[in-house]
Image (cartoon, helix red, strand yellow):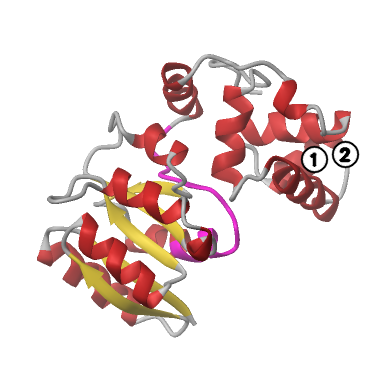
Amino acid sequence: MIRVLLADDQSLVRAGFRALLDAQPDIEVAGEASDGEEALRAVRELTPDVVLMDIRMPVLDGLAATRRITGDDRLKDVKVVMLTTFELDEYVFEAIRSGASGFLVKDTEPEELLRAVRAVVGGDALLSPGVTRRLIAEFAARSKEPSGADALAELTEREREVMALVGIGLSNEEIARRLVVSPLTAKTHVSRTMVKLGARDRAQLVVLAYESGLVRPGWLG
């Protein structure tokens, strides 16, 4: 059973998400929070699998709460999906740099929300369909100048190649087709790369691909 915590200062939003999620046989809502501080306390008490976290909340905003969650080794298995009202939210990339596994706009289709919850539990990055790879690249470029390839020294040439493909948004299946290998082989390379770089998930791997300069803004593969 996938346990979800809802963190949003709008009770109607929480009620809508709860109704949708609780209707699923493999998902249950473990708790709710109306601000970042409440969310942080609830995560520490309940250790849910996934937190649906609003970016803009009183007392403590979603970004700050996410940084505290992802910075706590005791909560390393908790995945955070940020919720935003606007697809072009200036905080989207900062949210991913803060450790979020992805983000969704609040008016996303129900099926997409359910897919998101299940995807992040499986270790996949989740980005709202309306956000293009160019946008991700632009946020990355604004966020930090490339720091050079020193951080990638432990990677093999194939792992760097795979990381670059992850960075431009390709799935394991797409990477497998590009490199003419099996999807399982592609997944193995991605997993090993994440372990070597200490990345929580694919979203963090995307961040590192840009920050290291391995992928540059505008590269769409």
Q: Which residue is mark 1?
A: 177
Query: Is 11 displayed left or right of 40 in the figure?
Result: left
Residue 15 lies in the magenta-colored region: no
Instruction: Give the quadrant of residue 213.
Output: top right
* Magenta residues (range): 117-131
x, y percentage for residue 102?
44, 47
Q: Quadrant of the C terminus?
A: top right
Q: Give the residue type that dot 1 points to.
A: Arg
Residue 211 rendering spot, x and y as whole percentages:
57, 23
Q: Is residue 178 above or below residue 111?
A: above
Nearer the observer, 22 or 60:
60
Q: Is residue 217 left or right of residue 199?
A: left
Foreground of the two, 151 or 11: 151
Q: Which residue is mark 2?
A: 180
Q: Dot 2 lies on which element? A: loop
Q: Residue at x 79, y 29 (%)?
A: 161
Q: Residue at x 22, y 59 (%)?
A: 37
Residue 148's image quarter?
A: top right
At label 2, the amino acid type is Val
Residue 48 disc label: none
Q: CA distance from mark 1 to mark 2?
A: 5 Å
- x and y percentages locating residue 106 in the rendered image: 25, 52
Please tell me whether residue 124 belongs to the stretch shown in magenta: yes
Total marks in image: 2
Q: Tell whether label 2 touches label 1 (CB within 8 Å).
A: yes
